[in-house]
Image (tube, rainbow, N blue to C red):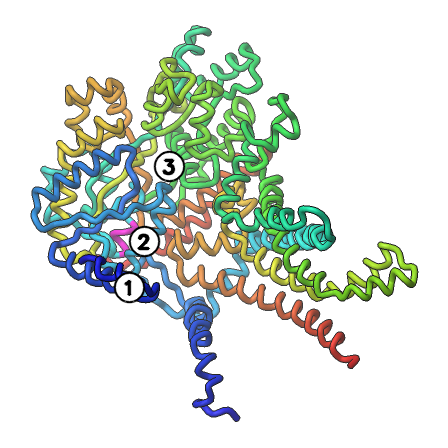
Amino acid sequence: MSLVPCFGLPSLEMKILLAILSLCLSGSTALAQTQLRFVSWRSEAAAVWDQLIAGFESGHPGAKVVREVGPHSSTEFHDLVTQKLRNRDPEMDVFFMDVIWPGEFAAAGWALPLDEYFSVPQQKEFLTAPIEANRYQGRIYGVPLFVDAGMLYFRKDLLAKYRLPPPRTWPALVDQAKLILARERDPYLTGYSAQFKQYEGLVCNMMEFVISNGAALWDEQQLKSTLASGQATQAVRFVRDQIIRTISHRGVLAYQEPESLALFTQGKALFHRNWPYAWEVANDPQRSKVAGHVGVMPLPSFPGHKSVAALGGWQLGISRFSRQPRLAWQFVEYMASHDAQKQIALATGRGPARAALYRDAEVLAKHPHFSARYETFILAEPRPRTPVYLPLSNIMQRYFSSAIAIPDSNIDQLAGVATRDMDRVLDLLRERPRP
Amino acid sequence: MKSSSDPVWRFLAPSFLFVVLFSLYPIIESFRLSFYRMILTLPWLGQKFVGWENYQDLFSDPVALQSLLTSMAFVAVTTPMEVLLGLGMALVLNESFRGRGWLRAIVLVPWAIPTVVASQMWRFIFNDRYGLFNFVLFGDATDRYWAPLAEPGLALLSIMVADIWKTSSFAALIILAGLQGIPRELYEAASIDGAGAWQKFRHITLPLVKPALLLALLFRTIDALKVFDLVFVMTQGGPADATNVLQFYGYKKSFAEGMIGYGSTIAVAVFLLSLILSLIYIRLLGARLLAQERPT
């Protein structure tokens, strides 16, 4: 469709009219090929994604992948995708899913169960934790793309200066930080920089403390909150008294990932909790003052318990309202294939979801730390799967933030309130008809 | 009686339809949904009529009551401040001096900046390590730096400051319009009678600008009651729920948690609250206007 004829027409109205007309027409000509609509956020390696998509299109003549780029923040991306799903919008076939959504999307009837396409032997090629996160009531609803897990970053140079080994337990971490802060006498230096703002990241950070003290967020079988247990409140009290009051400055209570990482890359934090992407940033001399002085290891635990990392990451899901689920699946299968994941991993350093890539010579040559990261990923703990995850998360965010941000908070009482509120939400699940 | 063929109706129809479609229908739908239990992520619960249950829940929900208080505190602090500052700005801008046009444009800049951008800017200003706020207060004494957005006692105050900075100029604009409607002769007559600046302000400006002041107060109150974007960008309701204003709580319930029934109930509560406040203001405002028109 060409706009040439209207250049001769002087009237603005006519031009607008023709422009609208041509838009309508171009819409209808595009229908000749099959459009596959893909909603994602913008990747750090956009060029690789474009290449992969072009590769898919050339392998599927007649198929055109139309990308819609959404916001990067998980909460806002959730708003966008659920808006389309609750409107049963057929204009979205494939979408990114945060690791905490499959339960919700499955129960709401928004995500297509993929069992007929995604066989168990195929699933076995992926890491176990993200596959489990995509399973809901025995069926699978997403294909893992990236895996994230909380890790502890530390200043190798500072620990070496005081001849300290990387800490295995939380109390050891606090003791080392106290010692180094006292000797360094830098008022700007903070002991532990992490994500303690009231938002989803707070739940990840706090669950790592709670579960590495042998407690749990809630009991998935009994549908009861377990936040008021002695071990859970002990872990929360530790964060308030030992981390926030003793070795961190209060600013961490307003930090999300970027601020907490900025403090670390400026050389003003001794220990730092973040997702794997922080490794590339912290070791890039362009962006980091501590490049080359950074160590990374699994998060500490409380004495006598196991280290725990919150599982994060992104999956590909297919909308139940898609008019071409088969083509959508072919696209998902292609994007999650060994080759595609390898290219993305090489370009971005994001952890791929396929286990074999952690033994791939080419990937390891580019990212030698992947082998250590693998240890964390297989231990990573998914946040419990449930269609009411977000209401529960909001209650926990309120509880954790109140417990650690108020210096003399009554943790037992706050935990009691949170337990009562969570149990009320969990009770909604008891009304479920048996499938 | 006007018949339906009267052209007046044809001219009114588009805007009438617009109001029905985009205001009336959503309001009625919110009212209806507030009587149902509807949870998007639990579709097997269906859409169950529960009568006043959501409202009972609302009144016994300590988080909702706390966020109501937070919203009220926000309104009580920001609106008078904004109207007072707006009055001050309007009085200055109403004088004639060199560069007045420029100053008028500059004063409007904060209001013209999209709130999301302004909120992000204030988030940086209040950052505990590299924020301008700390640098201005303490300079290089980094050990004394505050973290306003991390303190439950200061976070709401920080958002109030951002809101006052952003919208005072809107109040100024309305009040300036009011000031310009005051006839010059009144001031000239007062000068001849020997009135000073304060007397002119107290006995001419203030009474005559009162309707504009009330109008500014009305707009700001309703807007402040609905504050959302500042909270969304700056604090997400934290720390310790200290900035969880009613509108943000409703958003979390409806959009994040999918609790459509309860979320609608909160929306209706905000609507009724602003309706009541508007009615009170309009009463005051209407009385003033009538009182002015009567002595003819």
Amino acid type of the residue tagged 3 in the rendering = Ala
Report the residue at 44% width, 41% height from top.
A199
| Left or right relative to A206: residue B136 | right
Q: Secondary structure at mark 2?
A: helix
Q: Position of residue B217 (x, y in %)?
A: 66, 60
Quadrant hosting residue B154: top right
Q: Secondary structure at mark 1?
A: loop
User: Does residue A430 appear in the picture of this structure?
Assistant: no
Report the residue at 24% width, 37% height from top.
A130
Residue that carries the numbered disc 3 in the rendered image: A216
Residue that carries the numbered disc 2 in the rendered image: A82
Q: Position of residue B71 (x, y in %)?
A: 58, 54
Dot 2 falls on which chain? A
Dot 3 falls on which chain? A
Q: Earlier in the sequence, mark 3 or mark 2?
A: 2
Q: Earlier in the sequence, mark 1 or mark 2?
A: 1
Q: Earlier in the sequence, mark 1 or mark 3?
A: 1
